[in-house]
Image (tube, rainbow, N blue to C red):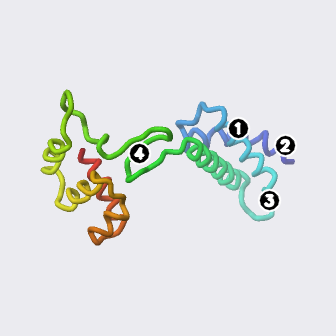
Amino acid sequence: MEQELFNNNMDLTYFLLHKYFPWYANDEDAKQICLIGLWKACEKFDPNKGYAFSTFAARVILNQMRMFLRDVRKRNRIKYVDNITYFEGEELDILEAIPDKYEGEVSLGFCFKELSGKLTEKETQVLQMKIKGYNQNEIAKKLNTSQPTVARCLQRIVSKL
């Protein structure tokens, strides 16, 4: 019975993959993961519960695919340091996020002066402390605020750059 359910519902896996994860529609790994989800659904389906196999299978297949995507994200871990994104092996700090609009060396004072017109007073204080080397917790203590507030402030600063 399991093999028959599996063979009759293989199209369901491809339909779900195309509908909910279209960017993985041609990925062989994703197709295999969906088929594994279908096989698990075939093994665990209980017709006495009163719902259709396709309803149950769709849930199992989608959950299997979501677990696969979580694993992919863990393998390709993107790190966030002070809300500035970089990939493993790269070094990036807030000064590198400042756009390089000028040829040659540009002093930090010049960049900061140009940015200060775009930033609020609190953002300016946070950026000054960040440039001096303080971490988010230290900045939060000095400004009498919370670390998540500082993190959001740094995020706004980077978006304004």
- Mark 4 and mark 3 lie on one chain; the one further toward the N terminus is 3
Q: Please provide percent x and percent y for residue 30.
A: 64, 38
Query: Quick one: which residue is furthest to the front in this view?
Result: 132
Q: Please provide percent x and percent y for residue 48.
A: 80, 63
Q: Please provide percent x and percent y for residue 111.
A: 18, 42
Nearest-to-viewer mark from 1 and 2 = 1
* Separation (CA) of disc 4 from disc 3: 48 Å
Q: Which residue is mark 2?
A: 3
Q: Amino acid at mark 2?
A: Gln
Q: Amino acid at mark 3?
A: Pro
> Dot 3: few (<14), some (14–19), or many (≥20) neighbours within 10 Å?
few
Q: Which residue is mark 3?
A: 47
Q: Which dot marks residue 85?
A: 4
Nearest-to-viewer mark from 2 and 4 = 4
Question: Is 81 or 17 nearer to us in this picture?
Answer: 81
Q: Which residue is mark 1?
A: 32
- Residue at (28, 72) in percent of width and height: 144
* Label 2 secondary element: helix
* Separation (CA) of disc 1 from disc 3: 25 Å
- Mark 1 and mark 2 lie on one chain; the one further toward the N terminus is 2
> Dot 2: few (<14), some (14–19), or many (≥20) neighbours within 10 Å?
few
Q: Confirm or deny contact between disc 4 and disc 3 (CB under 8 A).
A: no
* Separation (CA) of disc 2 from disc 3: 15 Å
Query: Quick one: which residue is furthest to the bottom in this view?
Result: 144
